[in-house]
Image (cartoon, rainbow, N blue to C red):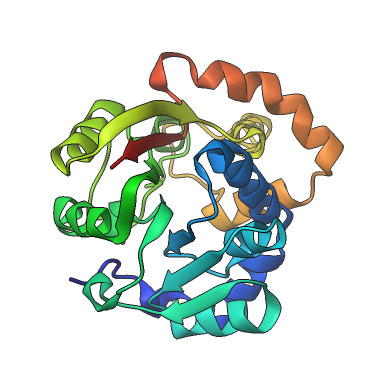
Amino acid sequence: MSYIDTADIFSHDWVVKHATSRDSRIDAEYRYRDLRKYLNNEGVLDIGCGSGLLVDLLAKRGYPAMGIDNSPICIEYAITHHSGRYNVVDNLRNMDDRFGTIILSHVLEHVETPLDMLLHIRQLLLPGGYIYVAVPNKMSYKAGTWREQLGLNIWGSCHLTDWKREQLVGIIRDAGFNAVEAKTHTAAHTIMALQVSYIYRKLTRQALSDKPVVSQRTIGIANEIFTSPLRWLFSPLATLSQQGNKGAEIVVVGQK
């Protein structure tokens, strides 16, 4: 059972950019704060760990953390630059370790058979352990803004499944977990990027129905040039966007 299908898209340059970007570090810190209450000393596994930022953060805070990914480039970078244990794994059935917490952050949407994956992850958890799952929210304001205002496909071809909050809760329960938390979340810098893109179109008098001239890459660059203090001016908008389950991502925590 291959757990993710995108190993070939991770170039060395992409990994370095991801690992060193301000947004990636902020996202890792948020993820740690969000799942901290589900952590213990029985081991943490981050499936699809990418460049290893979250595992590094967990290890430096004293947790026995391990990251796996099917991208050798990602794992090589993580081993060289970060704390924690890392392995190249393209099939979860090859794993014998057991963990108190397993993190599945923006991985499930890349999987052809998500229920099979969750069932096997349950076998890797110790009794009473937690699975922390985050996926993009199909019903988010972010998805609607990119699609309607910018005319862009926010997910890309590597996303094999789309998720609503109730769907994710349902499959977590189908896999035998007790769903102990379910919510949506939007990062402040996501709101800022969307607002910058919208304003740009208005200033250039580009009709919202026209083919967009602002690419995803341009939006990312615009996002990066803003300083951290300005970023947090958008926090109230991020909080507002989460009302009615419209946050950019869905987070569900299940307990074995």
- Compare residues 245 and 123 and report the one nearer the observer: 123
Q: Residue 146 location, x and y as percent?
A: 45, 37
Q: Is residue 201 left or right of residue 99?
A: right
Left or right of 179 on screen, residue 152? right
Query: Which residue is painted at 41% across and 36% down in the image?
Result: 251
Q: Position of residue 104 (x, y in %)?
A: 39, 53
Q: Quadrant of residue 81?
A: bottom right
Residue 68 to residue 190: above or below? below
Which percent across, then down, holds residue 57?
Answer: 67, 58
**Placement of the C terminus among the 4 image quadrants:** top left
Q: Which residue is at the front of the view, 106 or 148?
A: 106
Camera-side residue: 65 or 15? 65
Q: How many marks?
A: 0
Q: Is residue 159 visible?
A: no
Looking at the image, which residue is at 61% across and 58% down? 63
* Residue 245 occupies quadrant: top left
Point 36% across, 28% down: residue: 180
* Quadrant in which the N terminus is drawn: bottom left
- Image quadrant assignment for residue 209: top left
Percent from the top left, x then y, of residue 34?
A: 57, 37
Q: Is residue 79 above or below residue 123?
A: below
Q: In this orientation, does residue 132 appear?
A: yes
